[in-house]
Amino acid sequence: MKKREKFLDFSPPAITDKEINAVVETLKSGWLSMGPRVFEFEKKFSEYIGCRCSVAVNSCTSALFLSLAISGINKGDEVITTPFTFASTANVICHLGAKPVFCDIDKDTFNISPKQIESKITKKTKAILPVHYGGQPCDMEEIQRIADEHGLVVVEDAAHALGAELNNKRIGASGNLTCFSFYPTKNITTGEGGMITTNNKEIADRLKLLRLHGISSEAWSRYSRGGKWKYDVLAPGYKLNMSDMNAAVGIVQLERIKELNQKREEIYNLYTRKLSLLNAIELQKPRENIKSSYHLFPILLKNHNRDSFIDGMTEMNIGTSVHFIPLHLQPFYQKEFGYKEGDFPVAEDIYGRIISLPIHPMMTDGDAEYVCEAIMHILG
């Protein structure tokens, strides 16, 4: 097989002159921090999701932290989540003095298993934090049923799921506090940034207060023409706001999300057609009544060494990644909470065999076909 000359990046940001020009205009406007572009981005994001309110922050990590904090999560509480996620999902629970209680995942979807959630509920349980892995929505009907039955809060980690749908309704429109990421590898980017969606205006107003020092009037209201300098400190808030420079990129990216996600879907479908024929790998099996955001395309190796496979893909000039190292295998979570190898066998089995293939809007069908050919070549 002939090796391609140019390296195929795993997931670069899809930036055009439109985003660049939007940032330049913002720089020339004289207003760089949180102001009119952030507010415009929030409004357009709510319209896209189909929710009442959106609150822009500086990362999805901040979004998760604020959502749990406003839900009353405190020291000694427990929050049920998946170990098969990035560190931030559980780290924010720890920052609030609570304990992340891990629950194993479903072997087909790689999402948290609702069947095991109820067995983890104790008197200390206050919330469930599901993660929509790779852009495939969790079984939210069952998770919500469990939460309602036990009086628990649900905060959704939708870092991978912008544009994903469950029963023809976009993730983030349900009314739960739902957190999105705009990191450079995500479906749209702001460079760094995140968003919280909710249908409760009182909660949204409280989130906006806490994201910026807990003061009654943000800088735009104080320093723009007609603004008033006086403000009150109403709560000991944080410095977690998004800037207008980030929002300027986000506005343009959101306008392009249909084309960006459509291209991801095309690559996803091409991979599925080609790779589902191979006996040497397994593919993620989506649930019915969902539409993915096609953020990741993971494969599971059956009998091939993962490290040698990744080395082979790198040699063929193809970038790959691994999502994720289960958190219960990480030193901090083992030392702090007593988790150990063997606690979550499904997550461990999938982790030992999983690779994420490149999938992004700049890829061509030819790029995806080359990836499939390389996989067949490496696997013999």
Image (cartoon, grey):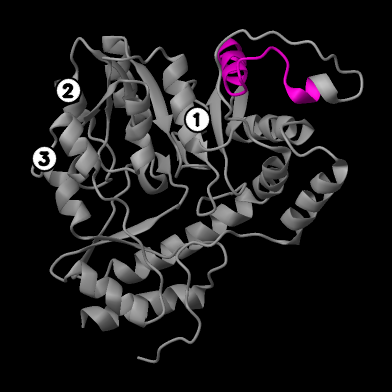
Number of the label disc, if any, that sits on residue 120: 2
Q: Which residue is mark 1?
A: 63
Give x and y (percent) for residue 325: 26, 50
For label 1, the crowd category at 10 Å Cα-Cα, with few meaning under 14, some 14 to 19 and many 20 or more, is many
Mark 3 vs mark 1, CA separation in Å: 29 Å
In the image, taking residue 122 as reference, residue 286 lies left or right, namely: right
Do the residues under discs 3 and 1 have CB atoms within 8 angstroms? no
Give x and y (percent) for residue 19: 72, 54
Residue at left offset 86%, top offset 25%: 224
Mark 2 vs mark 1, CA separation in Å: 25 Å
For label 3, the crowd category at 10 Å Cα-Cα, with few meaning under 14, some 14 to 19 and many 20 or more, is some
Name which quarter of the figure residue 263 lies in: bottom right
Magenta-drawn segment: 200-221
Number of marks in picture? 3
Which numbered disc flags the more N-terminal residue, 3 or 1? 1
In the depicted structure, whether residue 340 falls above or below residue 322? above
- Magenta run includes residue 214: yes
In the depicted structure, whether residue 264 falls above or below residue 222? below
Q: Quadrant of the C terminus?
A: bottom left
Name which quarter of the figure residue 94 lies in: top left
Q: Callout 1: helix, strand or loop?
A: helix
Q: Which residue is mark 3?
A: 340
